[in-house]
Image: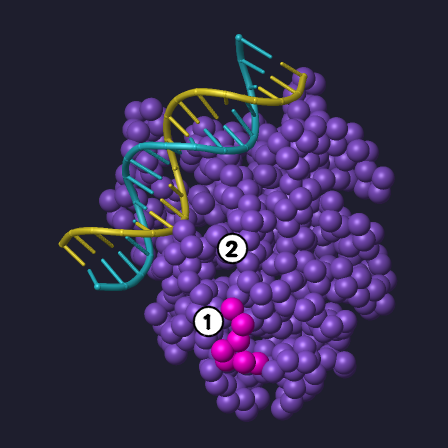
Chain colours: A purple, B yellow, C cyan
Amino acid sequence: MADSGEVHSEENKVPLDKSKKRTLKTPAQRDALECFYEEHKFPTDEMKAQLAEKVGLTEKQISSWFCHRRLKDKRRDEIHVNGRQDPSSGVIQDRASGLRQDSCGSIKQGDHRNIDLREVESRGIYGRDRPAADLTYVNRGCQDPHVGDMDDTSSESSSSLQDRVFSHNSDPYEIQTSPYLTQRGAIMPKNQAGARNMGYKPSGYLKVKGEIENPAITAVKRQLGRHYREDGPPLGIEFEPLPPGAFMSQSTNPVNEQNNIGDPSQCHSLGISGFLKQPNLNTKYEAHITRMGSQDSYEEDANCYSIHSDRPERSSYRQLKQKSFHNTSNSPLGQNSYLDTYEDSAGKTPVNGSNLSRISSKHAVEEMRSDSLSKDPGYYDAKISNKKAKPWLRDNNNVAPKNAQKNENLSRPSNLIPEFSQSLDTVERGPSARVTKVDKCVTERRHKIEYHDPVRVKMRPTNEVRVANQAKIEYPQQDYLENASSTKLLLLANQIKGSSMDVPCSFSEDETAETSSSLE
DNA sequence: TTGTGTTTTATTGCCTCC
DNA sequence: GGAGGCAATAAAACACAA
């Protein structure tokens, strides 16, 4: 890897035509690209250029990367639509455990949506706030041998799916960073000990899943009116929908009742109240999530689902691109659309008239995609609000006026990217395999969470409304939103100032080392 | 160490829109 | 016709098991 790293770093600056040899993006570069892609599926030329400059790639590479990235998404979506297509990919299903593995022991990217109910269970219940030590990115999701007795990598298929929304409870600032995290549900034991204190003796599948998940799994299964069977049905069967309120508040949720045993403070509710009672859930990674996807940590699931699942066919898609602009730009909400936010924050329209339509259309489509799923006004408001809370959208504190001026036509990316640029420069190509793995897992995990969580998507409307209502109750609309925003801004301002937090979308090597060492 | 499978990157051609 | 995007393809890089 060292060689490739050198090669890569060199070739980043060398015109591609001079070096046809394929090079890999550095983890930081990929992360930057991924993060950018999260926000902009169709970046404008300027954005590409800016990104290319910041990341140290050519615009062509950027374009190619985005193209392939979109393709990748599409393929995933197709896989989802067409159902499992594992035979060719070598994914096997352990009938006993009901878990899938690919030939490499990790869930395949394309399988993200084909989620085993058990995965859903574990994720739905535990999938929000995993104890840091237990959910360290490296160790949980990346087939790290240190995972311990969880030698069944299939367990990662559930846990890995969670990681994005899992907390890395290392950042005390992140208490309220993501109201959406709250909405997403489950409040998990703060630590593994807490789970262990529950006194469960897992067996069979539960043993495989790990102790921490067992109570939740058991509870949900109980609630579903079914008893867990170790030799349960194979994947692909259709499960009955969850009963109403299956993931409702703790008061009515046996899951919570069960999980709360022994530690009242350990609220496992899926509801917001539970989250609010559990301030330590959020972590540095939550910050990462929040910053990367901001509110998208919540919305992305829906968005990406809509983005990809509901993606119009090519022809209609193009039409959509063209027709949607006006609708989007004239947001009935009277608030800045995503596009508007972007452009307004830039202070000017970064494109000329001829390109405006096209470019804007792209954004419009992105925006439409992103918003198409959120018809809930409260949700939208929250989203808008969180847009405001996005430091890289508006916070130029870390950008000198000069630079701000320079980047004003690319305010958000410019704010985003500089944070990367440092790391991009510093992150060596070809770090330890571990770091590479981590980065990869970061990316994969994003996708796993991002694209393939049908159950969560199904659940969302319910939780969404509930959370919105809860939020309204607990915070007056404005207060709630502003609270989140100001908190975020504050936190992120600190993060930006903090050198250790300069990499918003990836774990720094330090973080990696930190998390790994924490387990050891 | 090697073979195999997967993922990622680069290239090319085609299509659609302006 | 140019530009942008999609799709197919090849090949390198990578991960893993034997």
C-alpha gap between disc 1 and disc 2:
15 Å
Position of residue A365 measured from the top left corner of the image (x, y, whole percent):
68, 35
Name the residue rendered at 74%, 32% in the picture: A324
The residue that disc 1 covers is A95
SS assignment at label 1: loop
Q: Residue at x 52, y 44 (%)?
A: A75
Q: Is residue A285 above or below residue A391?
A: below
Q: Which residue is mark 2?
A: A84
Regarding residue A314, the answer to whether it shows in the image is yes
What is the three-letter code of the residue carrying label 2? Arg
The spot of residue A503 in percent (x, y) is 49, 52
Left or right: A406 as drawn, with respect to A486: left
Same chain under badges 1 and 2? The reply is yes
- Place of residue A283 in the rendered image (x, y in percent of width and height, measured from the top left): 57, 66
Is A41 contained in the magenta span?
Answer: no
- Where, by quadrant of the figure, is residue A461 drawn? bottom right
What stretch of residues is rendered in magenta?
A228-234
